[in-house]
């Protein structure tokens, strides 16, 4: 997972950031379109060590190349606990630097 440090938006108790994840084999979006990379915006709550998915943008090629095949915005997802040594844990560490 690649983190766009330039996209970090710091708030009082949480921070938002865009990440990019590419896959070697095509996957399928929720509406059935093939994609090989997904850009996602999450909110990270530093003290609680949780994350909430806010949006996803799907691309047909690796590293966000090609015309967007899907664009989803989410509301009211419950915060998810961040598992130690997961990609989200590494993102939390980068986003929540004092």
Image (cartoon, rainbow, N blue to C red):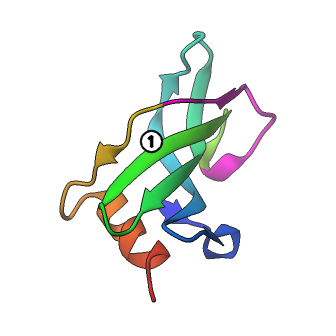
Which residue is at 67% across, 33% downward?
60
Which residue is at 20% across, 64% downward?
85
x then y, percent, for residue 40: 58, 46
x then y, percent, for residue 9: 66, 68
Name the outermost residue toward the top. 32
x then y, percent, for residue 27: 48, 25
Q: Horizontally, is 84 left or right of 63 in the view?
A: left
Task: State the residue in front, 1 or 63.
Answer: 1
Secondary element at image label 1: strand
Task: State the residue in front, 28 or 11.
Answer: 11
- Dot 1 corresponds to which residue? 24
Q: Quadrant of the N terminus?
A: bottom left
Q: How many marks?
A: 1
Whether 56 is drawn above or below 90: the answer is above
Q: Name the quadrant containing residue 36.
A: top right
Name the outermost residue toward the bottom. 98
Name the outermost residue toward the left. 84
Q: Horizontally, is 96 left or right of 55 in the view?
A: left
Q: Is residue 52 magenta?
A: no
Whether 96 is drawn above or below 43: the answer is below
Whether 36 is drawn above or below 32: the answer is below
Task: State the residue in front, 93 or 87.
Answer: 93
Q: Is residue 72 magenta?
A: yes
User: Would you call the spot at circle 1 few (<14 residues within 10 Å), some (14-19), or many (20 or more)?
Assistant: few
Q: Horizontally, is 56 left or right of 2 in the view?
A: right
Which residue is at 33% across, 69% downward?
47
* Highlighted range, magenta: 63-76
x then y, percent, for residue 64: 68, 48
């Amino acid at each position: 997972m690649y983190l766009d440090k330039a996209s970090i938006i710091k708030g009082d108790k949480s921070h938002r950031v865009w990440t990019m994840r590419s896959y070697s084999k095509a996957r399928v979006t929720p509406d059935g379109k093939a994609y090989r990379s997904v850009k996602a915006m999450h909110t990270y709550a530093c003290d609680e060590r949780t994350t909430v998915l806010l949006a996803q943008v799907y691309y047909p090629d690796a590293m966000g190349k090609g015309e967007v095949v899907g664009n989803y915005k989410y509301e009211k997802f419950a915060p998810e606990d961040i598992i130690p040594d997961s990609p989200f844990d590494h993102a939390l560490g980068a986003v929540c630097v004092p």
